Image (tube, rainbow, N blue to C red):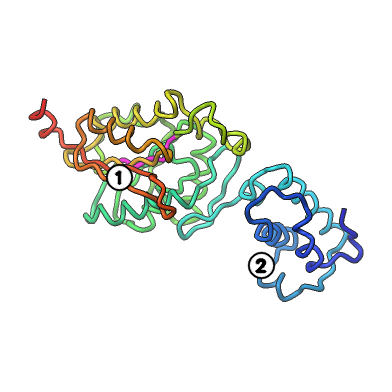
Amino acid sequence: MLQSSSTTVGDIIRSIGSANLCSDTPLLDCHLLLSRCLNKPKSWLLAHDEYCLTDDETQIYESLLERRIAGEPIAYILGSQGFWDMELTVTPDTLIPRPETELLIETVLATCRSAHQRVIDLGTGTGAIAIAIQRERPNWEVWATDVSAAAIAIAEKNAAEWSATGIKFLQRNWLTNLGKRKFDLIVSNPPYIEQNDRHLPALQYEPASALTASDAGMADLKTIIRQATGSLTAGGRLLLEHGYDQQTQVSDSMKNEGYTDIALLADYNHVPRAVLARWSPDRYQQEK
């Protein structure tokens, strides 16, 4: 326990190494928790090393720290997570956006240069992908679906916060019940972790439905690949994020469904992360 009557900002920062914090970034976590507790930016903390916390501030900091020691992600504790150029609201109803997923945004912007595109983000969660695309390409028609009503509510809140109010959010399971609408681009970061994967205990606070899939993690990826053939315009593109060891399976599934111009993409850590493909129905029929 901290000695609240004399504990300073500097004391807390210097003691974080002994806090039994299971984190790759304990100092950053400490700064973030202190910033939340004191409602001050990191720059203020560094400039006020001798500030003594009040009893109430100490109690708040300790409760936040205990949650982090227990393994709760810092994003859920703070209620937000940075993605692209935004700070998005997150809750346990949504997956925490990862920086690796920014590869999808970069690929969309580099690949689709038309002034007008109809785009849909499947399994939108916080809305991160759809909102980033809408902000970068305000003339595009952007749609987003999620099977979770709670996630859709969070996504709509984030869209309003970041002035991306033109997005059409729908509670749907992937591409079901969308009528005869066709899209120039379908993008998704679906569940792709195997249900008994050894990494799952570290992700216990995140919604399992947004993480795991049957068929060794491939079930939802295969569903989207199959459904997208009926929802893409001729020449439209499908862009999917996948697990580190699934790129060959994803690209093979795309080939089997008739996709062409398949591109294999890696993230900034050089880990296989996504596959981009084109839907060419005429060519597919010729090959059959």
Residue 106 shown in magenta: no
Residue 189 shown in magenta: yes
Q: Position of residue 70 (x, y in %)?
A: 73, 42
Label 2 crowding class (10 Å Cα cut-off): few <14, some 14-19, many 20+? few
Q: Amino acid at mark 2?
A: Pro
Query: Residue tagged by mark 1?
Result: 264
Name of the residue lying farthest toward the left? 286
Residue ID at (23%, 36%)? 232
In what quadrant of the picture does the C terminus appear? top left
Name of the residue lying farthest toward the bottom? 47
Q: Point out the stretch of residues depicted in magenta.
A: 186-190
Magenta portion: prevailing SS class = strand
Residue 35 falls in which quadrant of the image?
bottom right
Query: Residue tagged by mark 2?
Result: 41
Q: Position of residue 20 (x, y in %)?
A: 76, 49
Q: Answer left or right for 237 relative to 121.
A: left
Q: Nearer the viewer, mark 2 or mark 1?
A: 1
Residue ID at (16%, 38%)? 234
Residue 25 falls in which quadrant of the image?
bottom right
In whole angstroms, how far apart are the C-alphas of marks 2 and 1?
Answer: 40 Å
Sequence-first tag of 2 and 1:
2
Residue 37 falls in which quadrant of the image?
bottom right
Residue placed most toward the observer, 95 or 195? 195
Q: Answer left or right for 87 relative to 11.
A: left
